[in-house]
Each structure stands twice: as structure tokens, then as C-alpha cells.
Image (tube, rainbow, N blue to C red):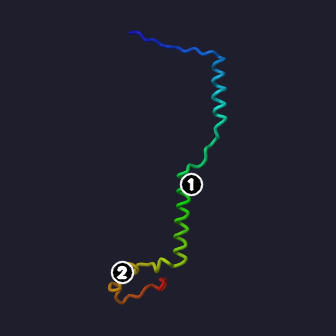
Amino acid sequence: MRYSIAISVQSERDFKAGMATRRAKMADQSPYPGTPRWVKISGILLGVLIMLAAMLMVSGIGGPHGPGRHLSPEDTGNQTPPAGDRQ
């Protein structure tokens, strides 16, 4: 069984020229491209949703919260809402 190996011989001058070209290409690139667009958009949307939820809580537009909110008036019977709930 025979194996053949091809060896490429490169002159030192060609090697240095190739290295100079690679260094020039690397110098043109910025070291870090920055935050990806999808991360920025996700952060902005998350911030808007948090602000919206906070405004709804503070303004009271969402109505009273608590366990009695999901019961129909017939289900409550003679129960009185806890003192902390809004009326």
C-alpha cells in the first residue's frame, strides 16, 4: 500500500505578505460589534410592558384584585370582602 503526501513549500516572503494582509483585515474590524438588535428590541419591549403594568396598578384601571374578583355575586353569599380590597 502506498501513501503519497503533498507538501506545500511557501517562501518566507510570501508568508510575511500573507500575515500582513491578515493583520490589515483584522485592523479594519471593530473589536466588538455591540449588542445584537434582537436583544435591544426585546429590552425595549420588556421595559414598555413593565411601565404599562405599573401604570395600570397605580391608576386602578384594572379594578379590585383578590380572590373574590373571580366569583359571581351568587357565589359570595354572606361573605364580606377583606379590608384591604378596593370597593
Which numbered disc flags the more N-terminal residue, 1 or 2? Answer: 1
Nearest to the eye among marks 1 and 2: give it.
Answer: 1
Give SS at disc 1.
Answer: helix
The crowd level at tag 1 (other Cα within 10 Å; few <14, some 14-19, many 20+) is few
Write the residue at 63% across / 23% down.
Answer: 18
> Which amino acid is tagged 2?
Leu
Question: Relative to residue 23, is residue 75 depicted above or below?
Answer: below
Residue 71's disc is: 2
Q: Point out residue 77 in the picture as x, y percentages from the top left corner.
A: 34, 88
In the image, residue 79 sits, relative to residue 12, either above or below, namely below
- Name of the residue lying farthest toward the top: 2
Marker disc for residue 54? none
Tag 1: amino acid: Lys
Disc number for residue 40: 1
Task: Give the residue displayed 65% in from the left and 17% down from the top.
Answer: 12
Q: Quadrant of residue 82?
A: bottom left
**Residue 40 screen position, x and y as percent:** 56, 54
Q: Is residue 23 left or right of residue 60?
A: right
Asked which secondary structure carries label 2, the reply is loop
* Among the 4 quarters of the image, the one containing residue 15: top right
Of the 4 image quadrants, the one containing the N terminus is: top left
Q: Position of residue 35 (x, y in %)?
A: 59, 49
| Label 2 crowd (10 A; few <14 / some 14-19 / many >=20) | few
Question: Residue 38: horizontal and vertical position, in percent?
Answer: 53, 52
In the image, taking residue 72 as reference, residue 48 lies left or right, namely: right
Vertical position of residue 7 compared to residue 82: above or below = above
Q: Residue at the spot x=66%, y=22% of the render?
A: 17
Residue placed furthest toward the left: 74
Instruction: Please state the total of marks drawn on the protein image.
Output: 2
Query: How far apart are the two marked residues, 1 and 2, measured between alpha carbons?
Result: 41 Å
